[in-house]
Amino acid sequence: MAAITTTRAGVAGAPVERTPFLLQVSMMAWRTLITNIRVPGVILPPLIISGFFLLVYNSTLSGAANFFLRGQSYLGFILPLSVVSAALSGASVAGQSIVRDIENGYFDKLMLTPVNRAALLLGPMIAGAILLAMQTLVVVAMALLLGLQPETGALGLLAVIGIALLLGVGFSGFTVGIALRTGNAAATSGASFLFFPLSFLTATFVPYDLLTGWIQTAAFVNPITYILDAMRTILNIGWDGEIILRGVGSCLALGIVLFIWAYTGLRARTKRK
Amino acid sequence: MSSGEIRAENLIKRYGEFTAVDGVSFSVKSGEIFGFLGPNGAGKSTTVKMLTTLALPTAGRGLVGGYDVMTQAGDVRRIAGVALQEIGLDNLMKSTELLTIQGQLFGMTRRQAQDRAAELLALVKLTEFTDRPVGKYSGGMRRRLDLAMALVHQPEILFLDEPTTGLDPASRRDIWAEVRRLNRDFGMTIFLTTQYLEEADELADRIAIIDRAQIRVEGQPAELKAALGSESINVTFREDLDVQRAQDQVVEMFDRVQIDRKTIRLYRNKAAEIIPAVVNRLSGAGLEPVALTLTTPTLDDVFLQVTGARFEEDAKDEAPKAGGRPGRRGFGQRKSA
């Protein structure tokens, strides 16, 4: 009798035909994608902002930057900032999608199905990553039109996009965590403002070495500093293993911490009270 | 093995100091339509949430189709369909997309889920609206789609939490027809909460009346009404004072007298036969009624009897009355909020 009860209670590996986990994740990602594409207001602003940064910084600062770049391309120096800002702002898609589901009650409806709880988290994050990759591609294409000639060629551009993707997915964990904890759209979009200290308290406009005082301290602890450095090195100097590793490592560290933040948020949200 | 039964055994739900559901017990037989009737805030939705695994009971036990809602939540979700009071639809998606995802999450292949979606859309008469995002649907259409969502996995037991609140009369009748059909054609057990007496009377085989977190009475509507036994003569006056005087005049002629604002309700068997005598007594005392009606008992009377308050009244100008309880201010006002 006890044995029977155990199998029944062990619904995690239920006797029912269950949808494979990856299919669940892709279904959740797919619906996040189509709903976001149906509201261009979600995708367009980050894209416009990133393109705007690239254009404005490139035309206003490129002359002044000659003294520290010593002949390197300012476009190659400033593109990573645009890419990073596209990644950080694009990362809010996942959080916004989840908070929308919570607010319109669809999240509860999903909770009444045998859906794997982790799919509710990963689906929107993957959809966010796909949108973000598309945004990054557009920004990179713009830079190419403006005359960017990366030292490491097409492979370098791919590497930059890859790092941006890693950063974006990681950072989406932050917005998702806020969305799940608050269930509130205003709080979730407010949380995206963390984007500002992250992308400005760093070697935003000049190299790290030229920063002084408190802002240098801030840049030192800000993982974005190392990510920008890796991207800039790839575009303007070449394959420098150590710098790139530090950049990728920073993405991963940030991503892991924020994923844990998101996952504990999911646990709190889906726990029956 | 599951059955279509639902059992609540002393279910309790507390949120901090507040007790939303206070020791609720009932049982619903397989294939029955059970009406869970009560005013806003009585504890209906909380009970549904506990039985459908969305909320954890503080104490007590809930069995749905033989599965324990606390330890066998997955099984409960598999055999029960739920349409909550707050409709849970993604407004940016289309009906077929929503139903297909729902079906796939319940283990159907994409093809099966699409077929099921088409079947259900026909069932709730939404086939011609599949191109429109759900956000553009009317209230009635959204309710019907939400109902279809609850039916995707062919549940044996269906929970409907206030399925017609906020709907116009025509949409309400559509939902009623649908509920009856599901029950008749598929033998589905249906647990329906409502704040409309008429709805419970119309649909339910049996009802329980919940008020202020506790069940006050349970039974078949006809049986509950019959238990009141008597018809009533309802006489309305212009002044509260007249009501008191009228009571003094006629109280001895009746089994039971209840005063409800400016109306006095006089209960006894075959009340119709003594209307002339009542009128004589009243006019002899110089009392002039503004209205006089004869009613057979309704669920509203049942509610009045078990809770001491009228279901849909505006409690603000509620007159003090025998057996009435103080402090029931205005719950009827939020009726259709």
Image: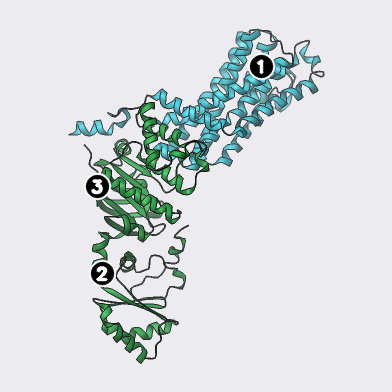
Chain colours: A cyan, B green
Other residues around mark 1 within 10 Å, as few (<14) / some (14–19) / many (≥20): many
Other residues around mark 3 within 10 Å, as few (<14) / some (14–19) / many (≥20): many
The answer to whether residue A80 is above or below residue A178 is above
Residue at image mark 3: B31
Q: Quadrant of the C terminus of chain A?
A: top left
Residue at image mark 2: B228
Q: Quadrant of the N terminus of chain A?
A: top left
Distance of label 3 from label 1 (alpha carbons): 68 Å
Q: Quadrant of residue B299?
A: bottom left
Q: Position of residue A173 (x, y in %)?
A: 53, 29
Residue at image mark 1: A229
The kind of residue on which mark 1 rests is Asp
The kind of residue on which mark 3 rests is Gly
B153 vs A26, nearest the viewer = B153
Closest to the camera, between mark 2 and mark 1, is 2
Residue displayed at 30% across by 82% down: B275
Q: Position of residue B318 (x, y in %)?
A: 43, 73
Query: Could you tell me which secondary element the residue under label 2 belongs to?
Result: helix
Is residue B317 visible to the viewer in this orientation of the structure?
yes
Query: Chain letter of disc 1?
Result: A
